[in-house]
Amino acid sequence: MKQILTLAALAAVSFGQPALAQSATATSTVAVEHRDLDLSSEAGAKALDRRIWRAVVEVCGTAPDYDIAGKNDVRQCRRDTKRVASAQADTVIASAVRGEAIRVSSIR
């Protein structure tokens, strides 16, 4: 079974979403592979965390520098999505379950 961590961000449905922000759509998903990592080691856990962060940045998108509200929405999306993804990754690491896919969505 393919081992992945999936992030789905619902950033586009947040209130105050500016029209010009380049944020993720409601169905934006990125698969984070972790089959190749030794999640029982610190190095493996750190590598997974880096992969999760890159996926969070991708699914939450960006906003132009002049769009303060959009920047704030993106920051909140990243915080929420990272928290949810990290909690599920911690569960996988702690239980050493490496054969299941994890589906993570932001709470927004």
Image (cartoon, rainbow, N blue to C red):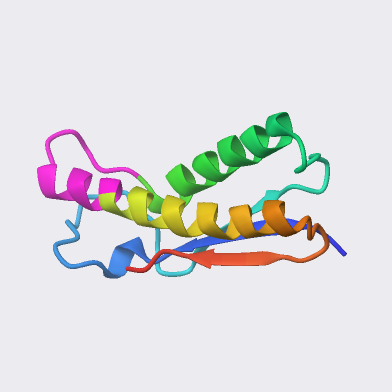
Residue 82 vs residue 64: left or right? right
Residue drawn where x is 27% and y is 52% of the image: 76
Image-quadrant location for residue 24: bottom left
Q: Which of the two residues, 15 or 83, is positioned nearer the viewer here?
A: 83
Q: Which of the two residues, 100 or 12, is positioned nearer the viewer here?
A: 100
Q: Give the residue furthest to the top.
A: 43
Q: Position of residue 53 (x, y in %)?
A: 50, 41
Q: Which of the two residues, 54 or 21, is positioned nearer the viewer here?
A: 54
Q: Position of residue 17 (x, y in %)?
A: 19, 60
Q: Give the residue furthest to the right.
A: 1
Of the 4 image quadrants, the one containing the N terminus is: bottom right
- How many numbered marks does the figure carry? 0
Residue drawn where x is 72% and y is 35% of the image: 44
Q: Is residue 72 magenta?
A: yes
Q: Position of residue 10 (x, y in %)?
A: 38, 66
Of the 4 image quadrants, the one containing the C terminus is: bottom left
Residue 57 vs residue 71: left or right? right
Residue drawn where x is 19% and y is 57% of the image: 19
Residue drawn where x is 43% and y is 54% of the image: 83
Extent of the magenta region:
62-75
Image-quadrant location for residue 89: bottom right
Q: Is residue 58 magenta?
A: no
Q: Position of residue 100 (x, y in %)?
A: 77, 66
